[in-house]
Image (tube, rainbow, N blue to C red):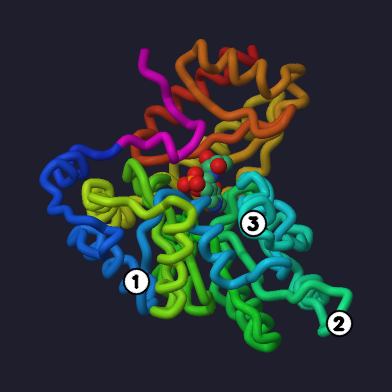
Amino acid sequence: MRYVELRSDTMTRPTPTMRKAMAEAEVGDDVFGEDPTVNRLETMAAERLGKAAALFVPSGTMANLISQMVHCGRGEEMILGSLAHSFYYEQGGSAAVASIHPRTVPNQPDGKLSLNELEAAIRSDNIHFPRTRMIALENTHNLCGGVPLEPAYLRAVGDIARGHGIRLHIDGARLFNAAAALGVPARQLAGEADSISFCLSKGLAAPVGSLVCGSSDFIQEARRARKVLGGGMRQAGILAAAGVVALNEMVDRLAEDHANARRLAEGLADISGLVIDPGRYRTNIVYFDVVKSGLSAAELVAALQKEGVRMLASGTHTLRAVTHYEVTAVDIDFTLKAMTNVLR
Ligand code: TLP
């Protein structure tokens, strides 16, 4: 049975061009810096984001942890949103693995942190306090509905960070979705960041991998951190080859995913029992509330699955649907019919 797969854009399978590039990739030992395909991907990524250097890592989670480890020492503090993926979904790795103290500021519904609250959270020099070393933002913001953070806001946060001599990291797992939604080049969303990561394995459809980008000094330290975390891969060019295709072929089509997400959100808003504000959703992630349907999120997910549609229960009464290149406008209409059948 074919499913319309809306649980995540991480479900995307490599395209035929990726599989061919992977099979034919020139490789070497990347721990020695000798994999030409990894080196090529890293150069492409750094150029795209306007940074001096980049590092290919196995996952978005590792990209975030590496950046935190480079910017913060043991017992030092990073400030991030209460709904940040790094805080919410990464097993508290900053504390568990790197002894970094996370300090949260409430995420606003638009994915931002209030500039006043952010600045107030930065510690003064006092023997009682940990030292604040880093601020982390997320763009697009997953749990806030895939909202993009625009350049003016990033500039304001960058000014605060610089003013206090602390670093700014951006978890740009879906940075190219943000760029597509805002109609700006990705590098314009990276300018303020001392480090910025993006994932190849989400909407860009590569099977594995993320890039973390920054200055040459930052990347040199990041390379050490990757090694201690066990992320030094050998003939990783097989994976990087798919990443090269992802950057060349999959970025410019992301607007299609956004249009499909909007089509889905608007259709869901017309179905009785569901609550959603479709205007909120500007990229490929849609959340909606099912409490009025009388079903729990888990029950609705199970019923949809029987109709050939997969979504994720992201809370007891909240579902998440994420569009990507394997989901067409016809699939969205099929999904809306399935939802109507289930709730009838
Ligand atoms: N997000 C996954 C799940 O972990 C929730 C998804 O399906 O959305 N930053 C952000 C903003 C992310 O959304 C994710 C993955 C990551 C980092 C981690 O990336 P990976 O899964 O490569 O470690």
Find out whether the residues at labels 1 and 2 contact each other: C-beta distance under 8 Å.
no
Q: Residue at x 76, y 72 (%)?
A: 118
- Residue 49 visible in the displayed image: yes
Mark 1 to mark 2 CA distance (whole Å): 38 Å
- How crowded pointer 2 is (Cα within 10 Å; few <14, some 14-19, many 20+) is rated as few
Q: Earlier in the sequence, mark 1 or mark 3?
A: 1
The residue nearer to you, when weighing 332 against 186, is 186
Residue indicated by mark 3: 94
Of marks 1 and 3, the one in the foreground: 3
**Image x and y of residue 241, in percent:** 22, 51
User: Quadrant location of residue 116?
Assistant: bottom right
Instruction: Answer left or right for 208 relative to 249.
Output: right
* Badge 2 residue CB within 8 Å of ligand 1: no
Question: Where residue 126 is drawn, which disc sits there?
Answer: 2
The Cα–Cα distance between marks 1 and 3, rounded to whole angstroms, is: 25 Å
Indicate the amino acid at tag 2. Asn
Quadrant of the rendered image containing residue 180? bottom left
User: What is the x, y in percent for residue 155?
Assistant: 59, 80
Pick whichever, 99 or 10, lies toward us. 99
Total marks drawn?
3
Q: Which residue is mark 1?
A: 46
Mark 3–mark 2 Cα distance, whole angstroms, equals 23 Å
Rendered residue at 63%/66% (across/down): 136
**How many residues crowd mark 1 within 10 Å: few (<14), some (14–19), many (20+)?**
many
Residue at image x 56%, y 69%? 169
Residue numbers of the magenta segment: 1-13
Looking at the picture, tell me which residue is in the foreground, 169 or 303.
169
Image quarter of the N terminus:
top left
On the picture, is 61 further left or further right than 317?
left
Does dot 2 land on a helix, a strand or a loop? loop
Label disc, if present, on residue 70 of the rendered structure: none
As displayed, is residue 333 above or below residue 284?
above
